Image: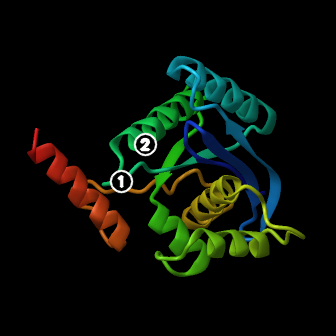
């Protein structure tokens, strides 16, 4: 039996979505991919409604075993981070309403899992996703490829098969954290101290 993972690269303007089936031997097969777009001039409530409605349709149509979402982490533009976090919240809540487990993965973890390097660029990720899924052409736009990479990463980290496990733990007592996980845990600890 394969593990069906729905990956989401969250964003208000472009929210990438991809579904893959991954067998126990790590062979990944494309099921579907796409991008939900909302215009920047639209009100926030309407933009989030479009994302919520779309993710509901994807979850109902493809019935994934688990949802993999990019973990929000950035020290750059606060307004961009807020939009990504809001889109993530809508997506996570949609999965929770259905009892679908949610796993969060950092961009560095996804790059490392798919390309072998946590510092790879988007082109490298897209190229390897195309190869892993045995596609004739790269999934476009890059947000869709990123969503597929998230889904593949989760399935590979979870060991494929029927397991829904594999969510990243960054709490006290976590062992063998990747550099990206350590950076995230350090950032969370720093944020708690500054409150």
Location of residue 62 with respect to 28 vertically, above or below: above
Q: Which of pointers 1 and 2 lies earlier in the amino acid sequence?
A: 1
Residues 180 and 21: in front is: 180
Horizontally, residue 187 falls left or right of residue 158, namely left
Name the element at disc 2: helix
Q: Quadrant of the N terminus?
A: bottom right
Q: Which residue is mark 1?
A: 74
Residue 57 locus on image (x, y percent): 75, 28
Extreme-front residue of the structure:
41
User: Mark 1 to mark 2: distance in Å?
Assistant: 9 Å
Residues 89 and 152: in front is: 89
Contact, CB < 8 Å: mark 1 with mark 2? yes
Residue 70 locus on image (x, y percent): 51, 51
Q: Which residue lies at the image location 45% right of the left edge and 67% below the top edge?
A: 108
Q: Which residue lies at the image location 56% right of the left edge and 25% below the top edge?
A: 48
Q: Quadrant of the C terminus?
A: top left
Location of residue 40 with respect to 140 vertically, above or below: above
Name the element at disc 1: loop
Location of residue 115 with respect to 18 vertically, above or below: below
- Quick one: label 1, few (<14), some, or many (20+) residues within 10 Å? few
- Quick one: label 2, few (<14), some, or many (20+) residues within 10 Å? few
Q: Which residue is mark 2?
A: 80
Q: Which residue lies at the image location 59% right of the left edge and 23% below the top edge?
A: 42
Horizontally, residue 13 falls left or right of residue 35, namely left
Q: How many marks?
A: 2
């Amino acid at each position: 039996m394969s593990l069906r993972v729905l990956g989401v690269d969250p964003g208000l303007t472009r929210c990438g979505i991809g579904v893959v089936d991954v067998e126990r031997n790590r062979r990944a097969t494309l099921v579907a991919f796409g991008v939900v777009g909302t215009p920047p001039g639209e009100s926030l409530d309407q933009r989030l409604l479009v994302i919520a409605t779309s993710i509901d349709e994807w979850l109902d149509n493809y019935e994934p075993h688990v949802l993999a979402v990019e973990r929000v982490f950035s020290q750059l533009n606060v307004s961009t981070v807020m939009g990504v976090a809001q889109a993530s919240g809508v997506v996570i809540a949609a999965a929770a309403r259905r009892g679908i487990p949610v796993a969060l993965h950092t961009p560095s973890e996804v790059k490392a899992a798919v390309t072998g390097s946590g510092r790879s660029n988007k082109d490298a990720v897209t190229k390897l996703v195309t190869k892993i899924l045995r596609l004739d052409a790269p999934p476009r736009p890059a947000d869709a490829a990123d969503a597929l990479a998230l889904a593949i990463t989760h399935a590979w980290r979870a060991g494929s098969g029927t397991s829904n496990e594999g969510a990243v733990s960054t709490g006290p007592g976590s062992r063998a954290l990747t550099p990206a996980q350590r950076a995230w845990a350090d950032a969370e600890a720093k944020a708690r101290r500054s409150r």
